[in-house]
């Protein structure tokens, strides 16, 4: 008997069916629902009893799989640890060693020899091994087949394979060119890859070298004290005290703030602070004097530095360096000068220079018996043209202007905060003296000073005398010669002479251009032709850069850069071009204008000023062409 049958038998009862009769409602339960629900619950219990053994079997299988997986992971980890342990025993980074031995003190310029050793204490070999030796720019390695230059500061040796328990070495030589007291470092570095690894490793070493002396000596002199605005000279002396010659030597100056460069002897080679010495033989010496003025606040120390070295692969390498300092001191007097009402004037040939020197007592005490002196010495000045305004004198032997109380009463006694001035003028020569290629970049330097016996001299100091320097760079002068010809062999002309109404006549215009005292750039000649005059396009030489604009009736000759003294020490630049005219009836009996205006312009490379030279019109009265008679200048009807 099943469990359902037993249940139905136990709960089955007799009852009166009439007593249960009533109107059916939603609260009445249905017998068929009760019976069906009971049967479903009992069925589910039977299914569970049948599924229970299956679930237990699945759990056992899952546990077994998990244990197998865990065992596999543990086994893999054991293998990895074992491999790592074995590799660690085969290779250790600390067992690859690179070192360098050699002198740690050296004289600049002396050849030094070092030994670089590398050692592999591991069992495994090292692959793709490369040794690099890094050094500063002022260390020059000796040329050797053992290594090559990877860069200006790195020498490279390709070693390749280094066997286990093996070592090797290379010899590395070179010389350091550095000032005394410089500490430089050589840094060998071995890059490699162990045969049992895929990664690269690096072994490093460093050796310091102290430079104890240098074969090139350099000395710098400068005044210890100076009044602001006063003139000064920096002197650089140098000598090769070594046992070998040096090539491509240069000296570079580093000026303090407030320094205004005037000139140098010898002249600078680049900018205003680099001199090319070139070859410096054993025992050879030299000197550079730099002139200028120094401005600054009272008490400020101004440092000047000079370097001596050479260019190595585009970089300036200093072999030695020295410095000097100047302290700005106060003076109870101030003095300043202007030329043509300007503190910075660029004169031209033929200019009149009108000097005004202004002075003032800045102190709290009166000063007596003052003397003003001005040094003005230049080959481009015309000393015969000197003019004084209200007194003064000129010392021809020393090229010195001076003023005393006998010339100006105020110089006899100058009260606190009182001021005054003196004036004079001098002309620049019309013809600048050019005899050699070094006659260029002229500077007119005027140094004025004022002094009084009442100015005290501080202990351990020179007497501070007020001074002022004014430097005037001379503009170059452009040279232009314009000529016209009818008979000219290079181009050839045609048409009637004298020119005739209604008929074409051609002429050749010849231009010659030159430049006097400074290099110039962007040089060009612009010529405006009158209406009725036309450029034919014929040019000699034919490759000359000349352009004709028909709309503006303008001819432009582009010259470009011109050196100083072109046309003086060398021939003038020259070009020819042809024009044509066709006179109209109203021009009969008159000359014909063939050029309206000519302008020669350029930029002065020394003064940076724009230079312009203008020339007026030119007509058919071509006296320079001797083949044209006087009757051939005017238009024939």
Image (spheres, grey):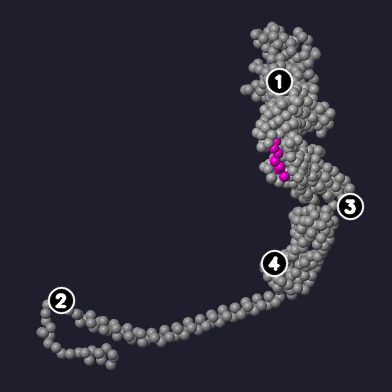
* Image quarter of residue 333: top right
Magenta segment range?
A: 327-333
- Which quadrant of the figure contains the C terminus? top right
In the image, 495 versus 627, the foreground residue is 627
In the image, 2 versus 146, the foreground residue is 146
Which is in the foreground here, disc 1 or disc 3? Answer: 3
| In the depicted structure, whether residue 334 falls above or below residue 613 | below
Which is in the foreground here, disc 4 or disc 3? Answer: 3
In the image, 457 versus 468, the foreground residue is 457
Q: How far apart, in angstroms, are the residues tagged by discs 1 and 2?
A: 133 Å
Q: Secondary structure at mark 4?
A: strand
User: Of the residues under marks 1 and 2, which one precedes in the sequence?
Assistant: 2
Residue 328 within the magenta-colored segment of the rendering: yes
Q: Which residue is mark 4?
A: 201
Tag 1–tag 2 contact (CB < 8 Å): no
User: Of the residues under marks 4 and 1, which one precedes in the sequence?
Assistant: 4
- Which quadrant of the figure contains the N terminus? bottom left
Q: How far apart, in angstroms, are the residues tagged by discs 1 and 3?
A: 62 Å
* Image quarter of residue 448: top right
Tag 4–tag 1 contact (CB < 8 Å): no
């Amino acid at each position: 008997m099943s469990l359902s049958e037993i249940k139905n038998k136990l709960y089955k009862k007799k009852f009166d069916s009439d007593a249960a009769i009533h109107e059916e409602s939603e609260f009445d339960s249905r017998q068929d629902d009760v019976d069906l629900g009971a049967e479903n619950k009992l069925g589910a219990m039977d299914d569970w009893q049948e599924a229970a053994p299956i679930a237990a079997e699945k759990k056992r299988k899952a546990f077994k799989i998990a244990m197998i997986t865990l065992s596999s992971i543990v086994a893999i980890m054991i293998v990895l640890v074992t491999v790592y342990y074995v590799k660690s025993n085969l290779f250790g980074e600390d067992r690859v060693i690179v070192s360098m031995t050699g002198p740690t003190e050296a004289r600049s310029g002396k050849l030094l020899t070092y030994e670089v050793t590398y050692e592999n204490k591991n069992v495994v070999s090292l692959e793709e091994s490369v040794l690099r030796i890094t050094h500063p720019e002022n260390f020059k390695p000796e040329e050797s087949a053992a290594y090559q230059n990877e860069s200006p500061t790195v020498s490279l040796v390709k070693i390749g394979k280094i066997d286990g328990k093996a070592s090797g070495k290379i010899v590395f030589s070179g010389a350091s060119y550095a000032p005394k007291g410089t500490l430089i470092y050589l840094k060998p570095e071995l890059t490699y890859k162990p045969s049992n690894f895929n990664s690269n490793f690096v072994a490093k070493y460093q050796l310091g070298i102290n430079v104890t002396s240098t074969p090139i000596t350099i000395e710098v002199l400068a005044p210890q004290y100076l009044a602001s605005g006063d003139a000064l000279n920096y002197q650089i002396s140098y000598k090769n005290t070594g046992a070998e010659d040096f090539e491509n030597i240069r000296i570079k100056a580093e000026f303090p703030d407030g320094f205004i460069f005037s000139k140098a002897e010898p002249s600078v080679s680049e900018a205003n602070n680099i001199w090319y010495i070139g070859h410096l033989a054993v025992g050879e010496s030299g000197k550079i004097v730099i002139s200028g003025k120094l401005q600054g606040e009272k008490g400020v120390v101004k440092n000047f530095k000079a370097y001596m070295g050479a260019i190595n692969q585009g970089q300036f390498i200093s072999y030695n360096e020295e410095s000097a300092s100047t302290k700005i001191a106060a003076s109870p007097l101030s003095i300043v000068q202007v030329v043509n009402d300007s503190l910075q004037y660029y004169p031209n040939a033929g200019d009149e220079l009108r000097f005004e020197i202004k002075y003032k007592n800045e102190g709290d005490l009166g000063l007596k018996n003052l003397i003003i002196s001005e040094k003005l010495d230049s080959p481009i000045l015309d000393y015969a043209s000197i003019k004084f305004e209200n007194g003064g004198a000129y010392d021809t032997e020393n090229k010195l202007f001076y003023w005393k109380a006998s010339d100006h009463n105020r110089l006899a006694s100058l009260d606190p905060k009182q001021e005054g001035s003196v004036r004079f003028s001098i002309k620049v020569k019309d013809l600048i003296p050019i005899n050699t290629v070094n006659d260029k970049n002229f500077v007119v330097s005027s140094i004025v000073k004022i002094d009084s016996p009442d100015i005290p001299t501080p202990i351990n100091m020179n007497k501070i005398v007020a001074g002022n320097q004014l430097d005037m760079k001379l503009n170059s002068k452009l040279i232009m010669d314009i000529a016209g010809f009818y008979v000219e062999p290079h181009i050839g002309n045609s048409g009637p002479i004298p020119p005739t109404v209604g008929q074409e006549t051609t002429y050749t215009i010849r231009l010659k251009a030159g430049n006097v005292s400074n290099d110039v750039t962007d040089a060009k000649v612009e010529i405006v032709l009158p209406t009725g005059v036309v450029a034919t396009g014929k040019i000699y030489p034919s490759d000359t850069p000349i352009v004709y604009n028909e709309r503006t009736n303008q001819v432009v000759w582009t010259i470009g850069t011109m050196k100083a003294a072109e046309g003086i020490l060398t021939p003038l630049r020259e070009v020819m071009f042809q024009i044509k005219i066709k006179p109209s009836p109203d021009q009969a009996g008159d000359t014909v204008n063939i050029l309206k205006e000519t302008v020669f312009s350029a930029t002065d490379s020394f003064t940076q000023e724009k230079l312009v030279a203008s020339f007026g019109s030119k007509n058919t009265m071509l006296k320079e062409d001797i083949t044209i008679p006087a009757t051939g200048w005017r238009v024939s009807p």
